[in-house]
Image: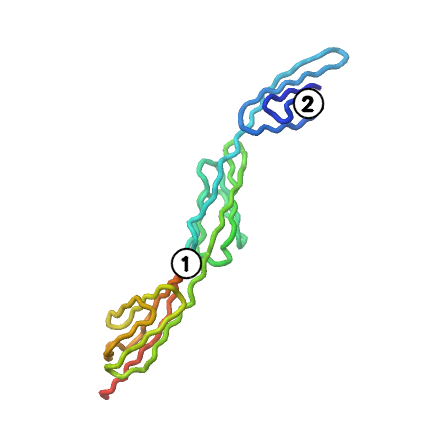
Amino acid sequence: WNWSFPGGSPASGTTSPITVTYAAAGSYTTTLTATNAFGTNTSTQTITVNAIPTNTASNGGAYCPGATIQLNATAGATDYDWTGPGSYVQNNTQNPTRPGATSVMAGIYTVTVTNASGCTATATTTVIVNSNPTATASNTGPYCPASTIQLNSSGGTGYAWVGPSAYSNGTQNPTIASCTLANDGVYTVTVTNASGCTATATTTVTVVNTSS
């Protein structure tokens, strides 16, 4: 046996069967020359090496708890099969979504793509699911009319308060001077952390009716 594999590795050989590797897709000519006691015969064949699909994976994170995870893979393949944390499996979908993000869903997602030639490639993307802040809300009441209400919150880097009589304030620990009975009621603060995730907390302000 005398093999010739231009462009292959190895480029030649003297055994049969023989394994040859081609680094790039394309058409390659291979020649076999066989010799025995009766003479020599040569055969030429064309080998077609199909391309491996191009594949990248990405996601739209980072995410806050409860958000919908968006996974993305390169277009152009004929099949997309995803696996990931929490026993996640999604077959035959290029860009799947995973609603209701939790910490269990964070981690590495792998997509295997298959092209029309049946060749495959894999890619990975890391999904990050951040934590919500632990929001607190309190006040120093009860209050008599005309006194100052003190609202307090903690747990984040941004604060947005709303309350009775269309009250709103964007500071952590706001005050309401010269309170009236109209300021009595439930106050809600939305706390945002450095990751952009939010949580809410409430506190009930009591303004004592001194006229009764």
Residue located 45% across and 61% down the image = 131
Residue 181, percent across and down? 24, 80
Q: Name which of mark 1 and mark 2 comes first in the sequence.
A: 2
Q: Mark 1: few, some, or many residues within 10 Å (few <14, many ≥20)?
A: some
Q: Label 1, on which residue?
A: 195
Q: Residue furthest bottom?
A: 212
Q: Is residue 22 above or below residue 152?
A: above
Where residue 150 sits in the image (x, y, percent)? 31, 76
For this orientation, the residue located farthest to the top is 39
Percent x, y of residue 97: 44, 49
Mark sitting on residue 160: none
Q: Which mark is residue 13?
A: 2
- Residue at 52% in and 37% down: 114
Which residue sits at x=71%, y=19%? Answer: 1
Separation (CA) of disc 1 from disc 2:
60 Å
Which three-letter amino acid code belongs to the residue tagged 2? Gly
Eyeballing the image, is 18 above or below 65? above
Q: For mark 2, give the secondary structure.
A: strand
Residue drawn at (52%, 31%) of the image: 51
